[in-house]
Image: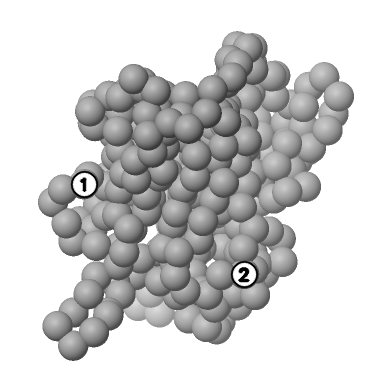
Amino acid sequence: MKSLVCGLLHLAIMCSYSQIKVSGVVLDDKNSEPIPYVNIGIENTPIGTASFESGVFILEIPNDNIKDSVVFSALGYQRKKIGFLALKDKDSIFLEAQNSNLDEVVVSFKKQKLPTLIDGLTKPNHGFLGMYWDGKYISRPDGGSAMGILLNKKSQKVFLKQAELFIHNNRLPTFDLRVRIMNIKDGKPYNDVYQKNILINSTKKKGGLVIDLSEYHIVLTEPFFLVFEWIISEENSKKLSDKNLDKQITAFSVRDIQEYVGYERKSSMSSWEQSKKVVVANVSYALLN
């Protein structure tokens, strides 16, 4: 009897920790083209992933969450929410493009000589005996984690020229990031004010990674979060799933500093939480006031 009870208890524990895996592809509802790097998951939980560049996604849901709804969110598209049980029967998820008037903005002043300001952190920590860097591991096999820094706190009218992110340590041959420009609600990153993908593929191992933003013609008049989101290729997903994960990592430089505010998100749909240390990043912009 004792062995039977122990066996049943072991079975119950295994079931409580088991997960259900679903997969599919996210497509544009007009032309059936795949949508890359869609944020997918259960809102305000660490359960989430991002689609690959092919639009294909793989999502694991714990048994305790099978009655929840899964959200699909992509830049330039309307959000879609599907119950997990219904999602199991779908191979393809179609998203509808949302209207945006961003393309109507004409940046005729971009070649003028205007005052330029660098806002943010421009170097990692420096110790008494030389340089030392703090790092925050951002790489994960499912993508969607992100860190952001609050900028333009004086609400100046600015034209974004370039961003710079400091890499603490990268052990992958290449890695992929998405730059997001987000407005603020309740002090946290909220919605994307630029509704197109700004994608970066880099081989940078350490130091400043400079990203040209001038081609996107982004003009802002309010404080914003400069966000760097970890996205992942199918190749890197396999590497990060291996047992030697500690040898295949990418980390952002971070600093313990009070002059700037930082937030981080652990997965595609988890809530934004204030960071104890701020990602070392900055933006250069032309002042238009």
Name the one closer to the observer, 143 or 13: 143
In the image, is residue 271 above or below residue 220?
below
Q: Amino acid at mark 1?
A: Tyr
Name the one closer to the observer, 4 or 192: 192
According to the picture, the residue beneath numbered tag 1 turns out to be 260
Q: Residue at x 48, y 32 (%)?
A: 113
Q: On residue 203, which mark appears? A: 2
Q: On residue 154, which mark appears? A: none
Q: Residue at x 47, y 74 (%)?
A: 206
In the image, is residue 127 above or below residue 269?
below
Q: Quadrant of residue 174?
A: bottom right
**Is there any visible trace of residue 271 in the rendered image?**
no
Q: Quadrant of the C terminus?
A: top left
Q: Earlier in the sequence, mark 2 or mark 1?
A: 2
Q: Residue at x 35, y 65 (%)?
A: 253
What colour scheme was applied to this rendering of the protein? Answer: one colour
At mark 1, the secondary structure is loop
Q: Quadrant of residue 118?
A: top left
The percent position of residue 156, horizontal first and vertical second, equals 30, 24
Q: Residue furthest bottom?
A: 129
On the rendered structure, is 238 left or right of 72? Answer: right
